[in-house]
Structures are given as C-alpha cells and as structure tokens.
Amino acid sequence: PPYFDTEPMNTPKTAPSREQRRFLRMINDSLQGRMSPHEALLVKEHTPEILQRHGLPDLPMLYTQNHLRLAVKPKSKETPRNQHGLTKELLARIPEALETPAVIMRSASKSGRIVCLLSLVDTDGLPILVAIQPNGRGNHKGRTVRSNFITSIYGRVNVIRFVKEAARRDNLMHIDDKQIIRLDSLSALQLRGALSSLIKKIPHLAKDAQVKNSQIRDSKQRPRQRRGRRGR
C-alpha cells in the first residue's frame, strides 16, 4: 500500500533559492551553448532521501541537454509528446521539488521506471511529472557515470485518471497529502479539489486492485476441472 506522509508542507519561498539559481545557471549555459554537447545537466548530486526510501540508489540525477531543449520548446499540436513549453524558471525548481513529491508511482509502460508527480504546474496549469530510470547512465564531468536518469519532464493531462489507474494497478508507492493539497491549489481551475478528493478514495482503490489481482492469480493457478462425458 502507498505510504502517506504526514510531515508539514514546505512553506513556499518568495525568492529563488541557492539550488534554483545553480540549476538555472546550468540551464542557461546549456541553451546558450556554453556546455559541452556531450555533458548531461546535473539535476541533483544525490538522489533525495524519499526516493531512496522507495528503492532508488543514492546516485546523481542527470538530464540530457536534448531533453532540455525539447522541454522548453513551445507546445505544438503536431508534436504534443515532444515539446512541453516549460519555462526555465519552472525547470529550475525541479531539483528541490523532487525532495517532496506529491506522488511516487511505478511506471505502467516502462518496466523499472519511477514516475514522480510534483507540486508544480506548467503555464497551462497542468501538474508536472518527472520520469526516472533508476541505475541508468549519463555523461558527467567528462565521463560516463551511473545515474538515476531523468528521461522526461512535462505537464500531464488527465492526471486524475492517470493517478486513479496507478492505484488500480497497485503502482502507487508514496503519497504526500500535504503536497497534493498544494498541487490542487496551483493546478488548472477544473482540477482544483479533484486530486484531494481522489486521495481520500486511494486506499479503497488500492484495496480493490489487490483483490482483483489476487483473484486473477487464483484463477490462473486453479487447475481446470475436466467435464465428465455425457451418458448415451
């Protein structure tokens, strides 16, 4: 079952933090061609403790410059899956937001991959999702290193259905209800309150998923009974 965090919600900062300024400088260096094209961006030197508690090793978290360039390109109907229209200032907040994700879940489409729903939104009010490949590899300081590699950062549409489906599949690993409330207050108007309402149903949804999964396993393991021959 998912772990519900009861720690107090972080107080929003009015000015960019030191970590935000560091990552923003790296973003600008990349976009302005001041970084080696082979070097990945260092999102975090160490994997946040909350992610380590859920099985990720303590490795640097890297993000490719190619992914960055796609992330900041304006959204396009022709390529909606590739260009995400994220601002540099929003991306600069990712390192700190990873310390307190609203939801951590296993990916339903990529085996072994972890997905974090953050209490941040894009310019359309869509909640930010970060996909992470544990024990990946990337270029850092001129050499290839092991990394919990960030494969994508984007604003997620249909997030209510996305989280609900994760609960049904028993893929939820962690829920921070305080960050969910914060995300609800930031997200698009039509989503406000919906995430918090869904969280109240999560234990029931997760339980339903476990019951269904056990029923499926039982049906697969149960030997088929042969039908007797009919008398003539």
Image (cartoon, rainbow, N blue to C red):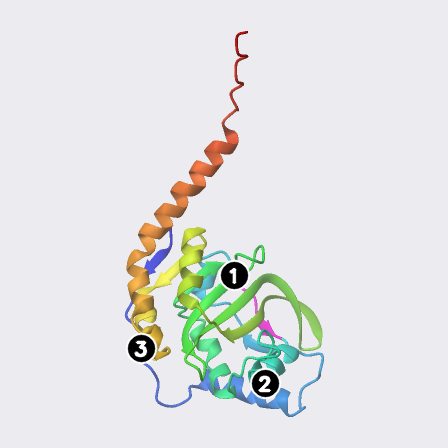
Q: Secondary structure at mark 2?
A: loop
Is 159 positioned to the left or the right of 136 in the image? left
Camera-nearest residue between 80 and 201: 80
Q: Earlier in the sequence, mark 2 or mark 1?
A: 2
| Residue found at the very far front of the displayed protein | 232
Q: Predominant secondary structure in magenta?
A: loop
Q: Secondary structure at mark 3?
A: helix
**Disc 2 marks which residue?**
73
Residue, disc 3: 185
- Is residue 5 visible in the rendered structure shown here? no
Indicate the amino acid at tag 3.
Answer: Ser
- Residue 27: horizontal and vertical position, in percent? 57, 86
* The label number, if any, that marks residue 114 in the structure image: 1
Q: Tell me the residue at 46%/59% (across/down).
A: 105
Using the numbered discs, state the Cα–Cα distance from disc 2 to disc 1 in whole angstroms. 24 Å
Q: Position of residue 138 (x, y in %)?
A: 66, 70
Q: Amino acid at mark 1?
A: Ile
Q: Nearer the viewer, mark 3 or mark 1?
A: 3
- The quarter of the image holding the C terminus is top right
Start and end of the magenta stretch? 56-63
Residue 12 location in percent, x, y? 33, 82
Contact (Cβ within 8 Å) of mark 3 with mark 1:
no
Query: Disc 2 or disc 1, which is closer to the eye?
Result: 2
